[in-house]
């Protein structure tokens, strides 16, 4: 990428302010660093490196992306050269980072206590899962988050009924309420697809209606639910 192109590079989402979404390539880059570092630590038996990687993940989760060194390198050096990737909900990769931090810090603690085999198993697990995410795009921690999010929504009973009056919507059968975010790339694809299928779609921007996101336990976007004229939720379209 030329110097002129670098100067004209623009983002749809500010990486340090628009925290509800993230360039999907950023977590993969971070996972590449974690996978490489963990593998080196396990093969060399240098458990302090596992602690360093775990501490970095923990600090970034607690204090934000600007304290995540691989993330900062990606946003400041790599992204301007390769462009911004698809934007995704940031909560799933953040949850994956929490799991990674727990495993890595535990591995370092076991290594310090002399339990080398346990340390190697935990560190190797992180290296394998992070490597899997980099090579295939399958983030196991992210998938766990999505499952827990769905279970939470069902068990909490928050999506059994939608208050149509609060949304300012007239009651009608087979209405689809879509919870979305303006910076979510996938969200923009869901609404046209649902409309092509013959649904009337009401979009709720969770960045503007955080009260509704909290009320209905929306933990991941896009989320589309089919609602009857009585406000009862009959199923998830997405």
Image (cartoon, rainbow, N blue to C red):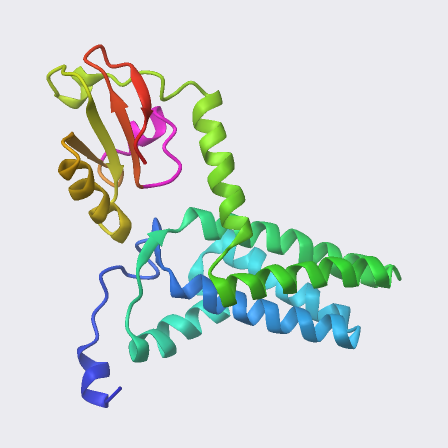
In the rendered image, residue 94, in percent from the top left (x then y), is placed at: 48, 51
Compared across the picture, whether 122 is left or right of 7 comes to right
In the rendered image, residue 65, in percent from the top left (x then y), is placed at: 43, 60
Q: Is residue 220 magenta?
A: yes
What count of labels does the image hold? 0
Compared across the picture, whether 149 is left or right of 225 comes to right
Quadrant housing residue 178 = top left
Q: Which residue is at a point 51% across and 55% down the rendered structure image?
A: 139
In the rendered image, residue 51, in percent from the top left (x then y), is placed at: 69, 64
Q: If the image is split into quadrants, where does the N terminus sit?
A: bottom left
Nearer-the-camera pick, 56 or 103: 103
Nearer-the-camera pick, 196 or 92: 196
Q: If the image is split into quadrants, where does the C terminus sit?
A: top left
Nearer-the-camera pick, 151 or 18: 151
Q: Residue furthest right?
A: 114
Q: Is residue 178 magenta?
A: no
Quadrant housing residue 235 = top left
Q: Which residue is at a point 36% across and 22% down the rendered structure image?
A: 159
Q: Which residue is at a point 43% across and 47% down the rendered structure image?
A: 91
Query: From what the image shows, is residue 202 above or below residue 65?
Result: above
Query: From what the image shows, is residue 161 above or below residue 222?
Result: above
Region in magenta: 209-221
Q: Residue furthest top?
A: 230
In the rendered image, residue 85, in percent from the top left (x then y), is placed at: 31, 65
Quadrant housing residue 2 = bottom left
Q: Which residue is at a point 48% across and 28% down the rendered structure image?
A: 152
């Amino acid at each position: 990428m030329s110097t002129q192109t670098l100067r004209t590079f623009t983002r749809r989402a500010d990486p340090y302010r628009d925290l509800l979404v993230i360039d999907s390539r950023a977590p993969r880059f971070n996972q590449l660093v974690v996978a490489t570092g963990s593998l080196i630590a396990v093969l060399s038996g240098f458990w302090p490196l596992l602690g360093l990687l775990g501490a970095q993940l923990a600090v970034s989760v607690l204090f934000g992306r600007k304290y995540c060194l691989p993330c900062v390198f990606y946003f400041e050096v790599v992204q301007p050269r390769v462009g911004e990737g698809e934007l995704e909900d940031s909560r799933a990769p953040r949850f994956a980072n929490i799991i990674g931090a727990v495993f890595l810090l535990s591995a370092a603690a076991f290594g310090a206590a002399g339990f080398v085999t346990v340390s190697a198993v935990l560190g190797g697990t992180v290296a394998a899962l992070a490597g899997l995410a980099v090579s295939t795009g399958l983030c196991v921690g992210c998938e766990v988050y999505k499952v827990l999010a769905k279970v939470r929504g069902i068990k909490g009973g928050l999506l059994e009924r939608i208050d149509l009056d609060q949304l300012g919507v007239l009651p009608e059968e087979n209405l689809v309420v879509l919870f979305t975010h303006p910076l979510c790339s996938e969200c923009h694809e869901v609404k046209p697809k649902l409309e092509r299928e013959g649904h009337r779609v009401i979009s709720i921007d969770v960045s503007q209606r955080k009260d509704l996101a909290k009320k209905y336990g929306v933990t991941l976007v896009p989320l589309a639910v089919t609602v009857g004229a009585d406000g009862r939720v009959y199923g998830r379209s997405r």
